[in-house]
Image (spheres, rainbow, N blue to C red):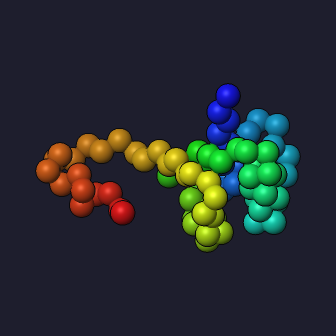
Amino acid sequence: MKLTIGTAQFGSQYGLANKSGELSENEIKKIIKFDIKFGINELDTAVGYGNSEKKLGAMNINDMSIITKIPRYEGNRNNLKKWMIY
């Protein structure tokens, strides 16, 4: 079985039951350390998750795959590569 951890609460006050708001960098590091310890090696994020992508990027995570969802591209298909950041 493969498990992917969602990161919406890493960068925003996501969740109906969320009483504490956005997770701190220290809390995120604990979650990632736990994940790696138990073989969870994939994180799911998105542009719409506040600053979760920025936080994850600053943590220099090398032991996990990070999947990010991007907004739908409505422009000319010939300019798609220019729209995306590599």
Q: Position of residue 39 (x, y in %)?
A: 73, 45
Write the residue at 35% across / 41% down.
72
Q: Position of residue 83 (x, y in %)?
A: 28, 57
Write the residue at 79% across / 57% down.
33
On the image, which quarter does residue 54 sit in? bottom right
Q: Is residue 2 visible?
A: yes
Q: Nearer the viewer, residue 29 or 52?
A: 29
Q: Nearer the viewer, residue 62 or 20?
A: 62
Relative height, residue 24 to residue 1 (above, below): below
Q: Position of residue 14 (x, y in %)?
A: 70, 44
Relative height, residue 25 to residue 77 (above, below): below
Q: Is residue 21 visible?
A: no
Where's the N terminus, which quadrant? top right
Write the residue at 24% across / 56% down.
81
Q: Nearer the viewer, residue 17 or 1?
A: 1
Residue farthest to the top? 1
Write the residue at 57% across / 66% down.
57
On the image, which quarter does residue 61 sit in? bottom right
* Left or right for 36, reference 4: right
Where's the C terminus, which quadrant? bottom left
* Left or right for 84, reference 80: right
* Left or right for 73, reference 6: left
Image mark count? 0
Q: Position of residue 59 (x, y in %)?
A: 65, 69
